[in-house]
Amino acid sequence: MMYFKRRNTMWFCAAVAFMVAVLPLASYSQVRQEEPEWVYKGRGDRYLKAGEPGKAIVEYKKALISDSGSKRAYPEVNMKLAEIYLEEKLYDLAFSYIERAQEEAQYLQIPDMIYDIRSIKAEIYARQGKYLDAVSVYENIIHEDSNWRKYAGQDIYVIEGTTFNDPESKKKYAHAYFELGKMKFDLQNYDNAIPFFKIALMYNFKKEASLRYLINCYKKLNNPVLAKKAQSLYTEK
């Protein structure tokens, strides 16, 4: 009887030793068979579009730890996570992810997406009440725009009704003009808000809101004539 017990014990120990040796290999095999980061990102995008941010977060974080050997999706994934946490009002968490996205800008598939990243960063600052930081980010964006250099010094009482047919520049800069104008308006700095709303209108960006703000700026400055002129010029377009 002792012999059989001894044999069973030996077989058990051998089995355990085999499992200890094999399991790490199995785990390693599973890790190596993970899906590429773009698969996780695509799945996360679909969940986000379907209104399921919790599931999107899970997929996005899988993308960040994927063993695909590529970092091409990293900045976009980090940007998406920042957007989700921004909407959830988890501003510190949102900021940490947008900082990573900005640091990884070299991996962007579309280089101009850096403007989206910077705009999100500015919005996080604004939501945190860090007004000067938000303004600084937005100003750095528009200072790269040749139209800002051309029209920034224009008299606020001059309204031409000029418009730009430049979709690429609009995508890069227009949002920053609009947000800067809103910030100035909220601080009752109406004369300084006017140039930003004028250029936002030139880009045809959020036309109704930009025009409404511009008209209200002139009204606040007791200039109903220019308010009416702005209404006339930009309503016709």
Image: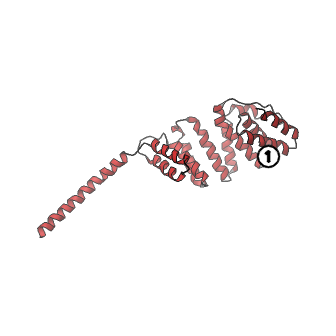
The secondary element bearing badge 1 is classed as loop
User: In the picture, residue 213 is in which quadrant?
Assistant: top right
User: In the picture, residue 137 is in which quadrant?
Assistant: top right
Q: Nearer the viewer, residue 201 or 195?
A: 201
Q: Nearer the viewer, residue 56 or 50?
A: 50
Q: Quarter of the image for the N terminus: give it.
A: bottom left
The furthest residue to the top: 165
- In this rendering, would 70 be left or right of 207? left
Q: Amino acid at mark 1?
A: Asn
Write the residue at 27% across / 56% down: 20
Write the residue at 55% across / 35% down: 110
Reply above or below: 214 against 125. Answer: above
Q: Position of residue 177 (x, y in %)?
A: 71, 40
The number of numbered badges drawn on the structure is: 1
Q: Quarter of the image for the C terminus: give it.
A: top right
Write the residue at 85% across / 38% down: 228
Reply above or below: 27 against 168. Answer: below
Q: Position of residue 38 (x, y in %)?
A: 46, 41
Q: Position of residue 98 (x, y in %)?
A: 57, 47
Reply above or below: 149 against 21. Answer: above
Is residue 151 among what the camera can see? yes
- In this rendering, would 128 be left or right of 191? left
Q: State the residue position of label 1.
A: 189
